[in-house]
């Protein structure tokens, strides 16, 4: 009990003695965590959105004339021979018109003066999940264009490709901000601790002469680093959560966030970021302790 | 501790100890000495005789160039750094240059010695108050040591050395800055530690007034050599022959 009380008291003393530097370090750790967590949050949400979009991929083959009931099995076989599909839906002109009318809801009156046959018939092809690779979708799309009466194929693969590129770019940003996080935490905490050690140099010398153990001298310094990691990451994550709440309340309905189902980190990820910050800051402390304290 | 109660068991045993500081300053040469448990020993000699070096060797602040030092039967050169630290908690040292923290109070400076042993706050407060009373420093309790006179700082250093009721107290010129009255307080502190707690006391001094009337053993150092002293006690005072 006395041991713990001394260690905690000594840690408090260290923090008080170099409070200005401690505050700056805390701010740096907080901003580093906030920056990293912000990009990581966007990245994970984009990954989830991409996964959802990928699950909903369908290829629409627009035709210049209706497909008769007799022709359908032959087309289904042809498409099935090229690649495995989940289902194939034939949409007539009338069905397309009915869908559009339903989508417009109360605004469907705008269709009153139009010919119900003005929309082209189409075939909707839903590939199986193992065919969701973008290059395969593209090949499938090229094949579908060779079907009889096909005039255009809409696959959304270009959009998905661009989305994929954006996600890759975001991955690089997350990697860079993560590296910044590691560097800033390890080095800044290490530097701060060095200042603590230097400011207490004469005291540490005397403590050594009085028989202070390694634990008595080193543990408070190690605890100081751990505390910086814990508080810095807590403040950083709390700031990110407030930012998220603010964005969520401003764009809640209807809009971008609903479209992408923007969500905050699950508890495991939050805990992992906290833990990683504590470990990094402790490593920074350990580095300084090993380098500057000879006991 | 009464002289006849001193054990024959040596607390410190130095065998052919030589200490040479670079480049070739021989502070101690071929010293062999036993200091017994419960003994009060006066180590005398002129400035530069090697008294401080001997004190530093006994508390592991220096290592001998050659020879062997045993403390409580253990060869110092074989004790691990952690073991040395544990041993230092049982050795009180009052340094000639005091080694106090000027920006801390008298209370904080003294209590530091007990804090490293994880003593309770109550025990620390009681012991520090007791020492302050014994050394007539009660009114200086919350003063910064940097604001004290040399004599007061010297007493604070002695109080810190005595705080843990050490098995061995090494005092280097403990009365150098003190008047006769405060010198008596210091001597009383040594006597109290020795008699009540069985502490072994080694006092390095060139102040003859301290040991002139003593019945305790007195050994003299001269130019790094130990010499017999006429005032040594016959039953315990033999210089150890290696």
Image (cartoon, rainbow, N blue to C red):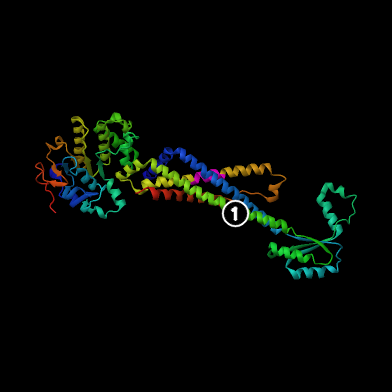
Q: Nearer the viewer, residue A73 or A17?
A: A17
Q: Which residues are magenta?
A: A229-237
Could you tell me how many numbered marks the image carries?
Answer: 1
Magenta stretch encompasses residue A228: no
Mark 1: secondary structure: helix
Seen at 54% across and 47% down, the residue is A33
Seen at 12% across and 48% down, the residue is B239
Q: Is residue A44 visible?
A: yes
Query: Badge 1: how crowded within 10 Å, few (<14), some, or many (20+)?
Result: some
Left or right of A259, for residue A36: left
User: Which chain is home to disc 1?
Assistant: A
- Residue sticking out furthest to the top: B139
**Position in image of residue A113 (x %, y %):** 90, 50
Image quarter (top left, top right, bottom left or bottom right) of the N terminus of chain A: top left
**Position in image of residue B33 (x %, y %):** 16, 49
Q: Magenta part mainly helix, strand or loop?
A: helix
The residue labelled by disc 1 is: A172
Q: Is residue A128 visible?
A: no
Left or right of B46, for residue A192: right
**Position in image of residue B91 (x %, y %):** 25, 45
**Position in image of residue A227 (x %, y %):** 47, 45
Magenta stretch encompasses residue A233: yes
């Amino acid at each position: 009990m006395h041991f713990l009380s001394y260690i905690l008291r000594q840690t408090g003393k260290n923090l008080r003695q170099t409070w200005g530097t401690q505050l700056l370090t805390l701010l740096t750790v907080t901003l580093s965590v906030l920056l990293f967590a912000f990009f990581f949050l966007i990245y994970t949400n984009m990954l989830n959105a991409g996964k959802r979009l990928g699950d909903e991929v369908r290829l629409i083959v627009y035709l210049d004339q209706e497909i008769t009931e007799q022709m359908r099995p032959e087309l289904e076989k042809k498409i099935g021979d090229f690649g495995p599909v989940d289902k194939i839906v034939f949409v007539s002109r009338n069905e397309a018109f009915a869908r559009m009318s339903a989508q417009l809801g109360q605004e469907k009156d705008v269709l009153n003066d139009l010919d119900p046959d003005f929309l082209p018939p189409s075939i909707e092809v839903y590939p199986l999940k193992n065919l969701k690779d973008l290059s395969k979708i593209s090949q499938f799309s090229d094949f579908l264009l060779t079907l009889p009466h096909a005039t255009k194929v809409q696959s959304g693969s270009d959009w998905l490709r661009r989305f994929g590129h954006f996600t890759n770019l975001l991955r690089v940003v997350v990697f860079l901000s993560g590296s910044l996080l590691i560097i800033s935490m390890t080095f800044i905490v290490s530097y701060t601790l060095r200042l603590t050690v230097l400011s207490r140099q004469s005291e540490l010398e005397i403590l050594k002469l009085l028989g202070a153990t390694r634990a008595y001298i080193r543990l408070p310094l190690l605890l100081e680093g751990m505390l910086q990691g814990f508080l810095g990451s807590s403040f950083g994550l709390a700031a990110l959560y407030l930012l998220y709440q603010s964005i969520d309340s401003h764009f809640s309905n209807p809009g971008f966030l609903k479209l992408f189902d923007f969500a905050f980190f699950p508890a495991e990820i939050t805990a992992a970021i906290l833990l990683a910050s504590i470990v990094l800051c402790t490593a920074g402390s350990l580095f300084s302790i090993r380098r500057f304290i000879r006991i | 501790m009464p002289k006849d109660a001193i054990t024959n068991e040596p607390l410190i045993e130095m065998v052919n100890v030589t200490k040479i500081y670079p480049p070739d300053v021989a502070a101690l040469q071929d010293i062999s000495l036993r200091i017994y448990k419960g003994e009060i020993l006066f180590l005398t000699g002129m400035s530069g005789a090697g008294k401080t070096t001997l004190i530093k060797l006994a508390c592991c602040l220096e290592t001998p160039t050659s020879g062997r030092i045993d403390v409580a039967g253990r060869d110092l050169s074989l004790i691990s750094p952690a073991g040395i630290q544990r041993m230092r908690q049982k050795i009180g040292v009052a340094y000639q240059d005091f080694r106090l923290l000027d920006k801390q109070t008298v209370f904080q400076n003294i209590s530091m010695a007990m804090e490293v042993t994880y003593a309770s706050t109550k025990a620390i407060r009681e012991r520090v108050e007791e020492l302050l009373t014994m050394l007539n420093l009660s009114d200086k309790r919350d003063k910064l040591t940097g604001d004290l006179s040399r004599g007061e700082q010297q007493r604070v250093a002695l109080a810190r050395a005595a705080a843990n009721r050490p098995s061995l107290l090494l005092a280097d010129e403990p009365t150098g800055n003190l008047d006769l009255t405060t010198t008596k307080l210091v001597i009383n502190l040594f006597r109290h530690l020795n008699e009540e707690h069985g502490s072994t006391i080694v006092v390095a001094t060139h102040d003859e007034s301290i040991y002139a009337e003593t019945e305790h053993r007195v050994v003299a150092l001269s130019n790094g050599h130990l010499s017999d002293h006429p005032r040594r006690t016959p039953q315990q005072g033999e210089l150890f022959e290696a």
